[in-house]
Amino acid sequence: MELRLQKFLAESGIASRRKAEQFIVMGKVEVNGKVVTELGTKIDTEKDTVLYENKKVVLKQKLIYIMLHKPEGYVTTVKDQFQRATVIDLLKGVTERVYPVGRLDYDTSGLLLLTNDGDLTYRLTHPKHNIEKTYEAKLFGTPSEQDIIQFRRGVSIDGKKTEPAKLEILQKGEKYSIVHIVIQEGRNRQVRKMCDAIKHPVSQLKRIGTGKLFLNDLEKGKYRYLTEKEIQYLKNL
């Protein structure tokens, strides 16, 4: 990211922008080993080395927290080796480098959190925290009462039983049903495998909630910044 030198110094906490300009003119700032006295000089914050009074200046990281309504057909990575579209491509206007919190399958849509707060990402994705994730699924056929009980007790997938989960039927049709599923784990393609196990495969899958955060009316492909209240809620989990 390119920044004017005085803005870089100000955002690094060295001084106000006006004071930073004075430091530059006074010859107190070096860029890549050379003293810079010209105001308006631009630097690359990732490649250039800036010293103020012989001490390296590091840009303070602005922590941001984003909720994205991920569409199908996007991979949940920063870069993809097969050149497929990634969720980062949807964050137009976001200049900070952010990373997905957990994953959503290529063919699954819904709520995805992204942030540059490494501590929070670690806490939210650590298995011991068991944060509820709510999905809306379109299934082939309609699960029976016994299927619902099986979800509640745990379903065996990949040779291991899942933690207790919830399955609620919202709509019944001749060929399909619409259900809500709530899980606490984040195993690979877990919801799809659980539905396969009860013989009601997933036709469409969307994550609508993480903990108490829900998509609500956020349109598919759009994102928004979390509120202070939502950020604090996640940090308190």
Image: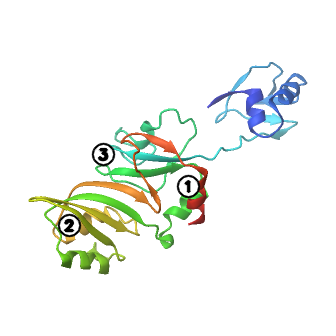
Q: Nearer the viewer, mark 1 or mark 2?
A: 1
Q: Nearer the viewer, mark 1 or mark 3?
A: 1
Residue that mark 3 sits on: 72
Q: Residue at x 46, y 42 (%)?
A: 223
**Helix, strand or loop at mark 1:** helix
Left or right of 196? Residue 12 is right
- Label 1: few (<14), some or many (≥20) within 10 Å? some
Query: In the orientation shown, which residue stands out farthest toward the left?
Result: 174
Quadrant in the rendering for residue 169: bottom left
Spatial CA span between label 2 and label 3: 20 Å
Q: Residue at x 87, y 28 (%)?
A: 23
Residue 127 on image: x %, y %: 47, 70
Q: Are marks 1 and 3 in contact (CB under 8 Å)?
A: no
- Label 3: few (<14), some or many (≥20) within 10 Å? some
Give whichever of 89, 64 is nearer the camera: 64
Left or right of 143? Residue 13 is right
In the rendered structure, which disc, 2 or 3, sits on the residue that comes first in sequence? Answer: 3
Given the image, on which type of amino acid does mark 1 rest?
A: Glu
**Helix, strand or loop at mark 2:** helix
Give whichever of 53, 5 is nearer the camera: 5
Residue 229 on image: x %, y %: 59, 55
Quadrant in the rendering for residue 163: bottom left
Left or right of 87? Residue 73 is left
Q: Residue at x 56, y 35 (%)?
A: 95
Up the image or down, 201 lies above or below 226; here it is below
In the rendered structure, which disc, 1 or 2, sits on the residue that comes first in sequence? Answer: 2
Spatial CA span between label 1 and label 3: 25 Å
- The answer to whether residue 154 shows anywhere in this view is no
Residue that mark 2 sits on: 196
Residue that mark 1 sits on: 230
